[in-house]
């Protein structure tokens, strides 16, 4: 093994090995013989060191004027843009999604970096009148301290950027623990911030696994802010870990997102959206379209055409030209998809296409699964209620808009939803009634933009939002300021 294949933690401005001197391999999910490199298997000692570095850096970074913080982020955004192709290739190699999609992932990080750089001159509070004379009132944002960020593997640069950029522009410092399946993309982001001039200790990076590194980060008493994106099971543990110390905790978890296709829909457009929403990123998005609720008038035609389109999708190594669907991230995720397909068969759902792992010379070294469509599904089936996180889409018939909305809302999650219709009244009714944090008209359930809040209702999260100015509310505390220049004691609510 060469030194170039060993990737280190970044703590207090230094690249260093883990305290236990253990590493784990980062493997290409499209070709498991392709070993990307060894990453540090961090433990609680490494996490504590990173937190200490972030805590030490906090006072100076807090006092750094936000426009100066913004200049560093702006330089980082420029560097990311210059290196977009290389960063996308690295991401495809470690995560598997097609190169076109990883370009989009990097672009999202670029967009978020530039957006939050702009907030360096717009960390607005409010000024308002007082109920008393000769008294001035205002509110200001204050940073909180060390932020523990735990990120997933499906958007391995975009989501770290969603969390890091608003945290640091507000004056906080950060310790990030990326998913063990995709540590390289987050490391590339941190390296870019280092090169852009971010002071030592403001952003710290530790790679490793959830129990050994993620849990100590979430539980540490010197980490008042924790932001987590991942599964509901782990999110519940993060919430419980933060409860005892009343931490700020942002949870972004699962989805079981639905497209409603009405009888008056443009079916060509709806099919485009269903293919992209259902099979983009191999269905490994929290916003993926895993349910399509079809009006009975278009159910048969849409189903036939959808199967025909899905059967033509090119599955393979995301680095190869023309590939539209890459591998699943791991053997474990492949097994999960296989289990859910078996569940669907036992529930008497009808497989229209797919339903099996892909084999042959092109596929045997990776975790590939055929795009799969279930028909004639009942809303109560497990495959219609539980998140599969793979290239599996269920088709559910409905009688009318009210019936469709009832089906769509009948799950534990509430992240994203969509309707295809030419009827503006139906579009607005669905917008009002759908219990999701994101809603689309005549577009699929994926496609969020960085300048709007991102997040969901019900068991998708705990009420906070990422991206846009909404993120600033999570990473700051409001301070209300009263300045009395009357030169006498004035008592609010009494001397009015």
Image (cartoon, rainbow, N blue to C red):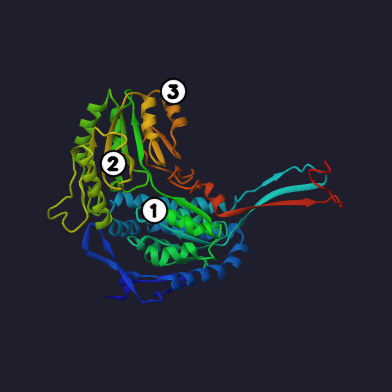
Q: Is residue 136 left or right of residue 4?
A: right
* Picture layout, residue 350 above or below residue 144: above
Task: Tell me how many marks there are.
Answer: 3
Q: Percent from the top left, x then y, of residue 24? A: 31, 69
Most foreground residue, 333 or 92: 333
The kind of secondary structure element at disc 2 is helix
First-in-chain label (1 vs 3): 1
Question: What mark, if any, has residue 249 been given in the picture?
Answer: none
First-in-chain label (3 vs 2): 2
Name the residue carrying label 2. 383
Name the residue carrying label 3. 425
Q: Is residue 120 left or right of residue 275?
A: right
Most foreground residue, 455 or 444: 455
Task: Locate residue 352: give its quadrant.
Answer: top left
Name the residue carrying label 1. 233
- As measured in the structure, the alpha-carbon distance from the residue carrying label 1 to the one carrying label 3 is 38 Å
């Amino acid at each position: 093994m060469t030194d170039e294949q060993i990737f280190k933690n970044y703590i207090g401005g230094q690249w260093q090995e883990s305290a236990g001197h253990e590493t784990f391999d980062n493997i290409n999910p499209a070709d498991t013989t392709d070993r990307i490199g060894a990453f540090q298997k961090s433990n609680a000692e490494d996490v504590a060191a990173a937190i200490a570095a972030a805590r030490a850096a906090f006072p100076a970074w807090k006092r750094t004027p936000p426009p100066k913080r913004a200049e560093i982020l702006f330089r980082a955004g420029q560097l990311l843009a210059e290196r977009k192709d290389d960063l996308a290739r690295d991401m495809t190699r470690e995560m598997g999604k097609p190169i076109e999609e990883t370009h989009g992932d990097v672009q999202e990080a670029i967009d978020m970096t530039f957006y939050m750089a702009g907030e360096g001159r717009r960390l607005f509070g409010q000024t308002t009148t007082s109920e008393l004379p000769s008294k001035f009132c205002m509110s200001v944002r204050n940073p909180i301290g060390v932020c523990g960020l735990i990120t997933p593997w499906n958007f391995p640069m975009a989501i770290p950027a969603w969390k890091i950029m608003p945290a640091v522009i507000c004056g906080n410092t950060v310790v990030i623990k990326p998913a063990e399946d995709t540590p390289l993309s987050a490391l590339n982001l941190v390296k870019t911030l280092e090169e852009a001039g971010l002071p030592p200790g403001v952003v710290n990076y530790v790679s490793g696994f959830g129990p050994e590194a993620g849990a100590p980060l979430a539980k540490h008493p010197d980490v008042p802010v924790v932001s987590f994106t991942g599964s509901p099971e782990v999110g519940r543990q993060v919430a419980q870990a933060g409860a005892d110390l009343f931490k700020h905790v942002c949870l972004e978890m699962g989805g079981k997102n639905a497209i409603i296709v009405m009888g008056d829909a443009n079916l060509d457009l709806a099919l485009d959206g269903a293919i992209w929403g259902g099979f983009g990123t191999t269905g490994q998005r929290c916003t993926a379209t895993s349910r399509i609720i079809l009006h009975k008038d278009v159910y048969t035609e849409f189903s036939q055409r959808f199967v025909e389109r899905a059967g033509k999708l090119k599955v393979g190594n995301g680095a190869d030209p023309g590939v539209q669907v890459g591998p699943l991230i791991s053997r474990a995720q492949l097994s999960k998809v296989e289990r859910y397909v078996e569940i669907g068969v036992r529930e008497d759902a009808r497989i229209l296409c797919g339903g099996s792992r892909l084999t042959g010379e092109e596929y045997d070294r990776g975790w590939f699964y055929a795009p799969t469509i279930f028909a004639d599904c009942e809303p109560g089936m497990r495959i219609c209620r539980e998140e599969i996180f793979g290239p599996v889409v269920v088709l559910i018939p409905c009688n009318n808009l009210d019936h469709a909305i009832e089906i769509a809302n009948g799950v534990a999650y509430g992240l994203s939803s969509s309707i295809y219709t030419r009827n503006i009244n139906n579009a607005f009714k669905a917008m009002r009634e759908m219990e999701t944090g994101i809603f689309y008209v005549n577009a699929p359930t994926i496609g969020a933009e960085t300048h709007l809040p991102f997040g969901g209702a019900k068991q998708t999260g705990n009420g906070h939002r990422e991206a846009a100015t909404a993120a600033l509310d999570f990473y700051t505390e409001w301070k209300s300021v009263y300045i009395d220049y009357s030169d006498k004691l004035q008592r609010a609510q009494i001397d009015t």
